[in-house]
Amino acid sequence: TSGSSGELLTQMPGKVVKINVEVGQEVQKGDCVLILEAMKMENEIKTAVDGVIKEIHVKEGDALESGVLMLEIE
């Protein structure tokens, strides 16, 4: 459940449990940026790139469909 570009999209419907980053924060490839609960399991969403959090499009408690842009890394 990670994007190869700087965009992280949901792979399956789920609920945002926790966001571990904020805009402007530096992240390294493999960092857990948010927790998405899907099918009664908590999934760590990790970044596939090094960069800086550019924008966060979701908030904790949001119920997301598949294919939603959660956050952007530049």
Image: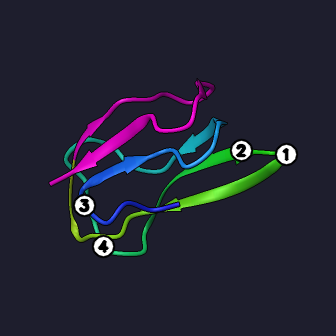
Left or right: where does residue 50 sit relative to residue 12?
left
Which residue occupies 38% across, 50% down?
8
Q: Residues within 10 Å of mark 2 (few under 14, many from 20)?
A: many
Instruction: Return the disc, 4 or 3, that comes first in the chain's sequence.
Output: 3
Q: Nearer the viewer, mark 4 or mark 3?
A: 3
Q: Determine whether label 1 and label 4 are within 8 Å by CB.
A: no
Give the number of the disc on residue 5. Answer: 3
Q: Nearer the viewer, mark 1 or mark 4?
A: 1
How far from the left and from the top, in percent, is residue 60? 56, 30
Q: Determine whether label 2 and label 1 are within 8 Å by CB.
A: yes
Q: Is residue 7 above or below residue 4?
A: above
Q: Which residue is mark 1?
A: 40
Magenta-highlighted residues: 54-74
- Identity of the residue furthest to the bottom in this view: 29
Measured in 3D between alpha carbons, the distance from the residue under mark 2 to the one under mark 3, in whole angstroms, is 22 Å
Q: Is residue 45 above or below residue 31?
A: above
Q: Residues within 10 Å of mark 1 (few under 14, many from 20)?
A: few
Q: Which residue is mark 2?
A: 37
Which residue occupies 56% across, 37% down?
66
Measured in 3D between alpha carbons, the distance from the residue under mark 1 to the one under mark 4, in whole angstroms, is 28 Å
Residue 65 on the magenta span: yes
Q: Nearer the viewer, residue 5 or 52?
A: 5
Per the image, label 1 sits on a secondary structure element best described as loop
Badge 2 amino acid:
Glu
Per the image, label 3 sits on a secondary structure element best described as loop
Badge 4 amino acid:
Gln
Badge 1 amino acid:
Lys
Q: Nearer the viewer, residue 11 or 54?
A: 11
- Identity of the residue furthest to the left in this view: 74
Instruction: Return the disc, 1 or 4, that comes first in the chain's sequence.
Output: 4
Which residue occupies 33% across, 75% down?
29
